[in-house]
Image: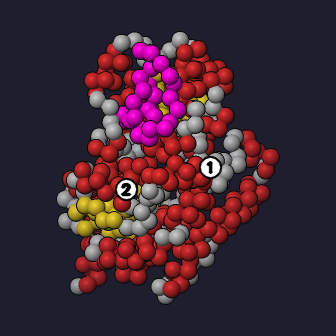
Amino acid sequence: MAKILLATIGSLGDIHPLLAIGRELKTLNHQVTIATSDQHGVRIEESGLNFAEIPPRFPEESQYSLLMKRWMDPKHGSDRVVREFVMPALPATHQALKPLVEASDLVIIHPFVLSGAYWAELMGKPWIAIPLAPLMFMSESEPPIVGNFLHPQSLQWLGSRYPLHWLLKLAKWLNGLGWKGFTQIRAEMGLKAVAGHPFFDYYMKRSAMVIAPFSIMLGAPQADWPSQTVQTGFAFHDRNDNQMHTSEPDQIEEFVAAGSPPFVFSLGSTGVFTADDFYVQAWEATKRLGRRAILLVGPQKDVAIPANAGRDCLIVPYAPHVRVFPKSSVVVHHGGVNSTGQAFRAGRPQLVVPLAHDQFDNAARVGRSGCGLSLPKSRFTADRAVPLLNSILSNSAMQAKAHAAAEIVAEEPGARGAAEAIDSFLKRFLDRAEATSL
């Protein structure tokens, strides 16, 4: 049995894959600890794993909505998360990670806790990278789509490979300005300087293994991915937990059984804090098409929801996606990796409404797969959504591709495959270490 540390900072989209992989590692007789912010401790322990709190603490409830509006901004959200949330806490996070890494045999690292890899390097321990989204691979073969480039064709004017290469190089350099704190900490530790971006040039290239926990339906392997990458498919976490205000199963089942398959609308665990009138517009679009809808509106009390929606609209805070997506006619979601994966898994066509971060890139990938369309949440109105939803409903080829995608996702090893790859690597590492000591 080995002691394995999984360290991360982020939302449920960052936690759920680690919970899924952590549970599988536990079945392989490893002792698993997840180190993350205070907000996730209860759900980690409910999953039967050890929890270790590390900074930063999540904002107070009174500040949460305001900060989410800043952090879910289409153009600046990702930079703000790093600059306003991750970096101010970096010295404290770094120190909190030291004893946790010291007590572990293997460390699995999210990018925001990169200095945990520095501790592992200093202590001679193996560490593994787990970039959760295809965008993080920054492949020239599949140029990333971010808030400033809403459509893949925006890059076509570049023509040959070399202008694109230099544009991506410039983008990495500009992004790296926000990551200087990691460079400074590395220098303070006395470790050898690494040229380039702490994420793209150290995290992605120097790890013992890179786990890509997403399906080939979202991102197939590219020639310029790190050579040590193991792609496993989505790591699904389908369990209820007491923090999510989950609706009663009977409520969902009764609604689904009462009529035609509904549209399901979701903005994930963070997008609901910047919903504005999304759910009102969603129900208006649904009514115009003569359909039914399930609205997953989140736990906050001040979200705008349809008034007097009637029996064809079920409004609930949350339901596990594995329970509702397969029962839908179309899944309308924000484009987070986990929601996208659940929609692929359900075999349902998608309308992706990206808000920020990697969601624009994921939306473009869903479009390229032939399994859905996209409409940025900032432009989401009933007038714009109706023709797109109607197009999806009438597109038999898209329905067939969504069904085929589900079969592919079902064949991928997912969280179990990731755990087995980690277990095999660890056995090889420990065997080499034992042979060296003889």
Q: Label 2 amino acid?
A: Gln
Neighbour class for label 1 at 10 Å: few (<14), some, many (≥20)? some
Residue drawn at 32 percent across, 77 percent down: 99
Quarter of the C terminus within the rendering: bottom left
Image: 205 above or below 336: below
Tag of residue 73: 1
The image position of residue 370, as x and y in percent, is 57, 30
Quarter of the N terminus within the rendering: bottom left
Residue under numbered circle 2? 39
Residue 15 visible in rendering: yes
| Residue interval drawn in magenta | 294-320
Image: 312 above or below 45: above
The image position of residue 34, as x and y in percent, is 32, 61
Question: Which badge, 2 or 1, is on the more N-terminal residue?
Answer: 2
Q: Secondary structure at mark 1?
A: loop
Q: Main secondary structure of the magenta part?
A: loop
Mark pair 2, 1: CA separation? 22 Å
Tag of residue 194: none
In the rendered image, residue 314 lying in the magenta stretch gets the answer yes
| Quarter where residue 277 is shown | top right
Closest to the observer, 283 or 263 = 283
Residue 209 visible in rendering: no
Neighbour class for label 2 at 10 Å: few (<14), some, many (≥20)? some
Q: Secondary structure at mark 2?
A: helix
Residue drawn at 36 percent across, 18 percent down: 256
